[in-house]
Amino acid sequence: MSPLDRVPPWTLAVVAMISIQMGSALSMSLFDRIGPAGTAWLRLALGAIVLWVIVRPQWRVITRHNLPGLLGLGIATGVMTSAFLSALERIPLGTTVSIEFLGPLTVAAIAGRNVKAALWPAVALIGVVLLTEPWSGVVEWLGVGFALLAAAGWASYIVLTQHVGDRFSGIQGLALATPVAALTAAFVGVPQAWGHITIEVILWGVVLAILTPVFPFALEMLALKRMNQRAFGTLMAVEPAIAAGIGALVLLQIPDALHAVGIALVIVAGVATQRQAERPKPFVDLPATPDP
């Protein structure tokens, strides 16, 4: 048993969220140079390199049974990352994450099989509405649209991360899927970044790649091996609160009283799922591939 196996899976998920939101806030420093899509592509491309150096996955572990899951996870990750940073360019971090949270919220609601299972996602939804304040001001519809696209990517990412994690040992599946994510992001990201890549940008990109995707995505894959989709999806409810906190500290985006109420609601919904966070081993699973 590795040391991480002794850590509660919800703890891994929370640490991953903190890393993701810190990386998201710091990513804005590259927007003026290579654009949000360019930043997404650079993070994923460098992250793929780092993961391959660390994990050293082998092509022979890819079979016709697990290839669709790997491709799907890579595409979902590329879309999610590019759309999220494009939204972040237009609307605040807390608002972006609140809208994006509708993805895992939907996963949690669908995974529940009774009215009680849908209670905490419903509470979280109220918090998301309070954080988003759709009734006030001028809505930046393009930013909202990108955030909704990121929400769809996030929902797919949760389902496919668990699917891929069940079929590979450790984080080999993540190492194999991340190059696909980088290639997906490259379609829009490379044209934005072309001609603006410098040594300074690359070095900063390595730092961002470690903050997200390398470190948090690895923790999430390990967490999803031991959690059910509903518990994980609802636990993600604390991410708007984490985003709001980091937005306040790093970007000086201070939440008002109404936002504080919304944050409290999503935290309550997230904490309430921890008692049932343990996930039994899959009933049917492909043979695990050995670590190289």
Image (cartoon, rainbow, N blue to C red):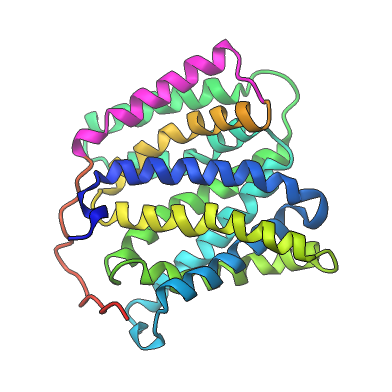
> Compared with residue 245, is residue 75 higher up or lower down, i.e. above or below?
below
Q: Indicate yes or no whether the magenta region holds residue 62.
A: no
In this rendering, the count of numbered labels is: 0
x and y percentages locating residue 214 in the rendered image: 49, 60
> Compared with residue 110, is residue 264 higher up or lower down, i.e. above or below?
above
The answer to whether one can see residue 71 in this image is no
Viewer-proximal residue among 277 and 118 = 277
Q: Residue furthest top?
A: 257
> Which image quarter: residue 136?
top right
Q: Image check: 186 left or right of 111?
A: right
> Which image quarter: residue 100?
top right
**What residue lies at 55% left-to-right and 13% top-to-bottom?**
258
**What residue lies at 60% left-to-right and 67% top-to-bottom?**
46
Q: Quadrant of the C terminus?
A: bottom left
Q: Image check: 127 left or right of 170?
A: right
Q: Which residues are magenta?
A: 253-276
> Compared with residue 139, is residue 58 higher up or lower down, i.e. above or below?
below
> Which image quarter: residue 207?
bottom right
x and y percentages locating residue 247 in the rendered image: 61, 31
Q: Image check: 232 left or right of 215?
A: left
**What residue lies at 47% left-to-right and 36% top-to-bottom?**
239
x and y percentages locating residue 103 in the rendered image: 47, 44
Magenta stretch, overall SS: helix
> Compared with residue 191, is residue 112 higher up or lower down, i.e. above or below?
above
**What residue lies at 18% left-to-right and 61% top-to-bottom?**
282
x and y percentages locating residue 232 in the rendered image: 33, 44
Q: Indicate yes or no whether the magenta region holds residue 263.
A: yes
Q: Image check: 208 left or right of 50?
A: right
